[in-house]
């Protein structure tokens, strides 16, 4: 049996292979190179990790910059939105007064309308027993008609519980609710009232009525003309005067009836007028009184504007029309602002 020994010639073989591939150093230098290989590998690994960390940091910085830019864009958009919303919110309203009224509601938008009452007097000239000027208010037939005309014509009848005189009004909201408010008083006399004879002048008498009448301009009479100032002792005028009373919240209506020699004859005249269907009537607006309010319902008045967005609302007296501001109205406003800015540029 022969003895066999083995020898590791790896370094020698490696050196030989290196020489075969062009290495020019000595065996000792090659050995040192092999000894430093682990250290060089660790440093290379650290260099690689450092490069990767730098790349990651750069990527994070770029991502942060993008996030910042996106946030700035969103902030700018939010600022634009808040500016727009400050100029336009769905709950803002546009209001117009007159008759007729041309406005610009959105298509199908409901219109809220308030109509002012008005006392009208038949005929012309001053009222007198020889020139009876009957008094009437709006809606004597029990309704008021409103019309909205644009792309289509819409008409609504507002129901009334009584005529509307000066100082009264009726409101139709955008849901069809009707609120009727009466501040005026219509008074018809027939001679049975507590007329009080004056001593100076003697051809005058007064009755006390509820409510404070602020000025002579706030009262009308079918048979006598209102007269400002102090009662005139001249027997010729056939006038209506007003005066305060000792009772708060009441007013004295004074008739200077002149042509009647006694109060009894004047009261007989009042009864004869009532029996003939032409009673002596007063309509007056009271000051600081609690109004009588009644409520009913009707169909809402909806607008169908013309192509230019306009709608004309008309009625039987001065009125106020309001509605929620449509987007189209704000767009027209913005266009005007932009045009004005461009003109200055």
Image: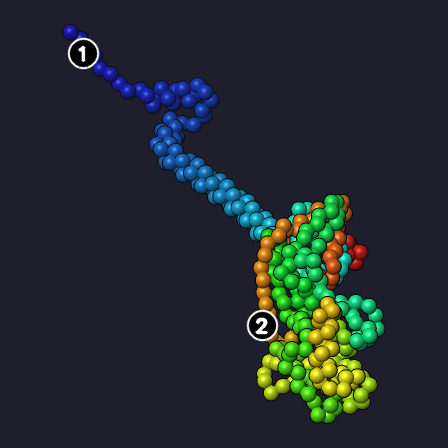
Does residue 321 show up? no
Q: What's the residue at 49%, 43% (across, down)?
A: 60
Query: Badge 2 is on which residue?
Result: 290
Horizontally, residue 8 falls left or right of residue 303, namely left
Q: How many marks?
A: 2
Q: Which mark is residue 271?
A: none
Colouring style: rainbow
Q: What's the residue at 65%, 77% (across, down)?
A: 192
Snapshot quadrant of residue 17: top left
Q: Secondary structure at mark 2?
A: loop
Q: What's the residue at 73%, 86% (across, down)?
A: 262
Q: Which mark is residue 3?
A: 1
Does residue 295 show up? yes
Q: Secondary structure at mark 1?
A: loop
Q: Position of residue 305 (x, y in %)?
A: 73, 47
Which of disc 1 and disc 2 is earlier in sequence? Answer: 1
State the quadrant of the C terminus. bottom right
Q: Position of residue 39 (x, y in %)?
A: 37, 36
User: Along the line of sight, which residue is nearer the eye, 77 or 120?
Assistant: 120
Snapshot quadrant of residue 281: bottom right
User: Along the line of sight, which residue is nearer the eye, 104 or 112?
Assistant: 112
Q: Position of residue 238 (x, y in %)?
A: 79, 81
State the quadrant of the N terminus. top left
Snapshot quadrant of residue 231: bottom right
User: Along the line of sight, which residue is nearer the eye, 69 or 135?
Assistant: 135
């Amino acid at each position: 049996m022969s003895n066999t020994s083995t020898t590791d010639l790896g370094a020698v073989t490696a050196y030989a292979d290196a020489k075969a591939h062009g290495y020019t150093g000595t065996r000792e230098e090659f050995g040192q190179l092999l000894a430093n290989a682990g250290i060089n590998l660790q440093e290379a690994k650290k260099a690689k990790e450092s490069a990767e960390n730098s790349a990651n940091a750069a990527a994070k910085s770029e991502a942060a910059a993008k996030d910042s830019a996106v946030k700035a864009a969103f902030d700018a958009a939010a600022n634009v939105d808040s500016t727009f919303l400050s100029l336009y919110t769905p709950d803002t309203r546009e209001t117009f007064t007159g008759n007729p009224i041309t406005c610009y509601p959105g298509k199908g938008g409901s219109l809220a309308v308030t109509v002012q009452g008005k006392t009208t007097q038949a005929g012309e000239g001053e009222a007198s027993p020889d020139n009876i000027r009957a008094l009437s208010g709006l809606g004597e037939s029990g309704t008021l008609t409103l019309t909205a005309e644009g792309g289509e014509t819409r008409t609504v009848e507002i129901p009334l519980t009584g005529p509307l005189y000066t100082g009264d009004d009726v409101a139709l909201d955008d849901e069809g609710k009707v609120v009727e408010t009466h501040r005026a008083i219509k008074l018809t006399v027939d001679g049975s009232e507590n007329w009080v004879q004056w001593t100076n002048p003697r051809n005058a008498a007064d009755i006390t009525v509820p409510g404070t009448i602020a000025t002579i301009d706030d009262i009308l009479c079918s048979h006598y003309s209102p007269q400002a100032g102090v009662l005139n002792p001249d027997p010729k005028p056939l006038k209506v005067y007003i005066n305060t009373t000792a009772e708060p919240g009441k007013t004295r209506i004074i008739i200077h009836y002149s042509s009647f020699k006694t109060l009894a004859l004047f009261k007989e005249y009042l009864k004869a007028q009532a029996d003939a269907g032409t009673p002596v009537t007063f309509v007056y607006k009271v000051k600081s009184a609690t109004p009588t309010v009644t409520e009913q319902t009707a169909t809402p008045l909806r607008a169908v504007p013309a192509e230019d967005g306009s709608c004309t609302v008309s009625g039987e007296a001065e009125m106020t029309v309001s509605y929620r501001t449509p987007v189209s109205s704000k767009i027209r406003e913005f266009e005007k602002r932009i045009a004005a800015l461009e003109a200055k540029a």
